[in-house]
Amino acid sequence: MSKTGHITFKQNGNPVSSLTFGRYKVTVADSSPKNGFIVQEAGLDPVTVSGVSYVGKRSATVQFSVGQWLYYPTVIGKKTYFLVTR
């Protein structure tokens, strides 16, 4: 996450548009003291990887099940959707 709060979600250097289901280690390099990083399966509880006031590198292991997911900053920002497939 940039200092301005812009977030990207990448795997092997490429933006994520889909993932194969399974357990992944999600690492956030957070430079913004005003935003964090959340992933969420549509309709379920979110997983906060990096909180609002945290600045630095943080990781969380997330079990991605088949379905529609999204990621977004904790405060204000665009929600970006991606699919998790078999």
Image (cartoon, rainbow, N blue to C red):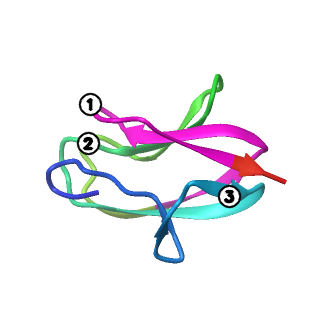
Label 1: few (<14), some or many (≥20) within 10 Å? few
Alpha carbon separation for disc pair 2 and 3: 24 Å
Please provide percent x and percent y for residue 37: 39, 46
Of residues 64 and 33, the one drawn nearer to the viewer in this rendering:
64
Q: Main secondary structure of the magenta part?
A: strand
Quadrant into which the N terminus falls: bottom left
Residue of label 1: 76
Amino acid type at mark 1? Ile
Of residues 60 and 69, the one drawn nearer to the viewer in this rendering:
69
Q: Is 82 above or below relative to 41?
A: below
Of residues 72 and 80, the one drawn nearer to the viewer in this rendering:
80
> Which mark sits nearer the N-terminus, 2 or 1?
2
Instruction: Look at the numbered discs 2 and 1 and tell me whether their residues touch, using CB distance below 8 Å.
Output: yes
- Residue occupying the far top of the picture: 43
Please provide percent x and percent y for residue 81: 53, 40
Residue plotted at (60% across, 65% down): 25
Please provide percent x and percent y for residue 12: 53, 77
Label 3 sits on a secondary structure element that is: strand
Q: Is 27 above or below relative to 74?
A: below
Mark 3 or mark 1, whichever is nearer to me: 3
Residue plotted at (26% across, 42% down): 35
Residue 55 appears left or right of 68 = left
Instruction: Look at the numbered discs 2 and 3 and tell me whether their residues touch, using CB distance below 8 Å.
Output: no
Which numbered tag is attached to residue 35?
2
Residue of label 3: 19
Label 2 sits on a secondary structure element that is: loop
Please provide percent x and percent y for residue 61: 63, 58
Residue 15 appears left or right of 36 = right
17 in the magenta segment: no
